[in-house]
Amino acid sequence: MRDRSAIVRMAKWSALHPGRAIIGWFVFVVLSLGIGIAVGTHSATTEDYRVGEAGRAEAIATEGGLQRKPAEQVVISARTGPLDVAAAEAAAAEVTDRMTGLAEVEAVAAPVRSADGRMVMVEVTMKGPELAGRKHVDPLLEQTAAVQANHPDLLVEQTGSPSISKAVDQQRSSDLALSEAITLPVTLLTLLLVFGSVVTAGLPVLLALSSIAAAMGLAMVASHVLPDAGVGNNVILLIGMAVGVDYTLFYLKRYREERARAGGRLSAEALVELAATTSGRAIVVSGLAVVVSSATLYLAADVIFASLATGTIIVVLIAVASSLTALPALLVKIGRRAERRQARRDARAAQRGASATPKRAAKASGSVWQALLRPASNHPVLTLVVSVLVMLGLAAPVLGLNMSVLGKDSFSRDIPAMQTYDRLHASFPELQVRHQVVVRAESANAERVTAALRDLGQRATADPLFAKNTAPVLRTSADGRISLLELAVPFRASSPEALLSLAHIREDYLPATVGALSDVEYGVTGDVPRDKDYLDHQNEKLPLVVGFLLLLTFVMTVLAFRSVVIGLVGVVLNLLSAAASLGLLALVFQYGWGADLFGANAVGSIGSRVPLFLFVILFGLSMDYQVFVVSRIREAALRGVPTRRAVLDGIGTSASVVTSAAIVMVTVFASFVFLHLEEMKQIGFSLAVAVLLDAFIIRIMILPSILTLLGRASWWPSRAMRRAQSQPTAGADTGAGTEAGTGAGTGAQAGALTVPLGRIR
C-alpha cells in the first residue's frame, strides 16, 4: 500500500515538480513580505497594556481627559564648575520659545531649578497618546540640539520616555544585526562540518532566512488582529533561525542516510519521498508541538505574550512548510546534479575499463557517542540518579527566584538619553516616581472628593517615603466627575521604597480617606502601580498557562508515540530542563555568579516575562529532540529490536544531528546574550542553557537510562509495540549498530512501497 499521507503527497509533488515548488516558495515569501510592508504594523496602544487596578484607574483618568501624556525633559547644566544661572535661564527661555512653536507640543512648563542649584529643567508635554510620543520626538530633539549649538559653554540635553523608547528601538535594531552577524557564520560552519558540502550547508540557512522574511511580513498582517507589542520581530528572528535550521537539518540527515543505503539504486525523487515518510512526519509533529505550546501564551491575557505567541506560531508554521515543500524540491535539483556528475564519472571509468566507484555505506555511529552512551547502557540506575541530582542542584536557586518588571532602571546606560535620565533624577529625585490617585464620583460629590484627596495628600506628605519639597498636584475634569491627585516619590521605580509607598496609599491612606466616601470608584496608577499589577496579573495566570502547557504536551506526545509512559517521561524531563535553566539564570542574573563571563548585569531580579516564555518555548523546542530521538528508537523497536538495544541504536544514530541542531540553537540563543536589552539577554541565556542541558544531559544520560530501565514498559499501552517486541524480526539482528540499519531501515522498508518501479535504478 502506498503512503497517502498529506506530508508524503506534498513532498512527492515538490519532488516531481521542483521548479514550480521552488518558484512558488519564493513567490510566497515575496508576497508575504510585500503585503506586510503594504499594510504596515499595527502597534499596541496604551489601552492594550492595561491590567488590574492601575489599568482601571488609567481608563477612568482617560475618560476625564486626565490621562498621562508623553513628556520630555530638557535639562541645562554646566560643563564644568558651578552653573552660570543667567546663561542657563537664557538657554531655558530659548528652549521654551522653540518648543512652544512645534506642532507636536501641547504645553511647556516654566523652567525649574534643582535644589542644589546645579541644573535647570524645562518639561515639555507632547500631544497624542503616551506610547505615540517616540514617533514624533525627533523635532523636539532637533530643537534641543539647536539650543546646545547656540550655548556651547552649557550642557543642554533631553530625556524622557519618548526619546528613551526611540533610542531603545534603535539599539535593538543594531543588536539584532549583531546577532545575525554572530549566528550566520557559526551556523554555516557547523552545517559545513556536518555535511561537508557548501551547497548542502547553505540550504538550512537559506530556508530559515526566507521563512523569517515571510513570517515578518505575515506578522505585520496579523498585527491588525492581534496588536504587535514591539517584540514580534525579535522572537521571529530568535525562533525562526533555530527551528528553521533544525527542521531542515533533520530532513537532510534522513535524506542522506537513505541515499547512502540505496547505493545509487534510487532516484533523488524516490529518496525525498522516503525521507518524507519519517523525518517529514517528525517535523510536522515537532512544529505542531511548538505551535500548540506557544498558543497557551494567549491564556495569559497579555498583549506582550500574545505578540510573542503570534510571532512564534507564524514563523514555526512557515518553517515547517518550507521543509515540506521548498526543501524536497531543492534536494531533487541538487540530487539530479549529483546523479549527472556520477553518471559522467561512471562513463569515464567504463571507457578506461575500470569498474564504477561504489557508493560508500553510511558510517556506523561514532565511538564518541558510544562512549557517551555507555554509562546509561551499563549503569542506568547510577547514571539516572547522578544526572537527576545534578539537574536538581542546578535548579535549586529557583527557590529564591525574584521576579520583577524590568523597566528603565535596567536599560543600557550606553544610551545618551539614559545617561541624561540618571543626571536628571540625581538633581530632581522627586521626578523618579509619581503615583496618580484617580477618583470617579457624581459631580455633586466633587467637594467631598476634593477634601478627601487633600487629606490623602497631607498624609502622604508626612510619610518619609514621599517627596517633601514637592506638593501634591490635584486636577479635576471639566464636568467635575473625575479627579486625579499626583504624589511624588524620591526613589527609583525598581526600589523597595517605591513599592512600599504604593502599599501605604492602597492599604492605608485610600481606605481612610476616599474609601470612606460612598458611591465613588478609585484606584492608583503610574509606573510602579502598573508594574505591580502586571506582575500580580502574570502570577495569577501562570498556573493556568503552565497547566494547559503540561496537559497539551502530554497529549501530543501520547498521540505521536502511542505511549502514555513516553508522554509522562517527556513532561517530567521538560520540567527538569526548564527548572535547571531557570536556576542557572538566577545564579547569573540575580545573584551575579559569573555575570562578567556572559556580559550580564546582576540586576537582582529576573524579568517577569522570562520564566513563562522559557517554559512555553522550551516545551515546544524540546519536542524537536524528543520526536527525532524517540522516533528513531521506536522505529528500531517496531522491527523487534529489544528496547535496550533500540535505545542505544536510536540515540547513537541521531546523536550527531541532535548535537549539530543543538549547536545551531545555542548559537542563535546565546547571541541574544550580547544584546543590550536586559530581558532579551535573559531569554537568550535561559534558552541557550536549556538547549545545552536538554541535548547533552537529558537526551544522552537521563532519557536512555529511563527507557533502558523501563524496557518494554516504555511503550505502554501500544499494542503494535507489544506485538513487535514479543516477536523479534530479522531486523533485530541485522539492523542494530549501523546508521543504515537503525536510522533508515524502517523508513526504507515502509517507504519502498511508495516508490514507483520506474524510479528504481
Image (cartoon, helix red, strand yellow):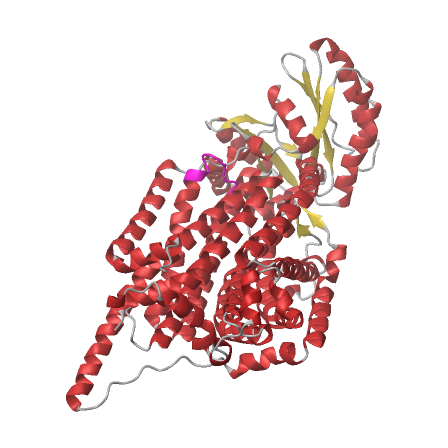
Q: Is residue 558 above or below residue 153?
A: below
Q: Is residue 4 above or below residue 691?
A: above
Relative side of 707 to 327, left or right: right
Secondary structure mostly seen in the magenta stretch = loop
The image quadrant of residue 268 is bottom left
Residue ID at (40%, 43%): 218
Please give the range of residues in magenta.
221-231
Q: Residue furthest top?
A: 444
Would you say residue 305 sits in the magenta stretch? no
Residue 120 showing in the rendered view: yes
In percent of width and height, residue 67 lies at 61, 26
Q: Quadrant of the N terminus?
A: bottom left
Q: Quadrant of the C terminus?
A: bottom left
In percent of width and height, residue 266 lies at 30, 71
In percent of width and height, residue 519 lies at 76, 15
As rendered, which of 2 and 316 lies closer to the eye? Answer: 2
As rendered, which of 742 and 54 lies closer to the eye? Answer: 742
As rendered, which of 548 and 461 lies closer to the eye? Answer: 548
Relative side of 187 to 308, left or right: left
Q: Residue furthest left?
A: 351
Q: Is residue 508 above or below residue 381?
A: above
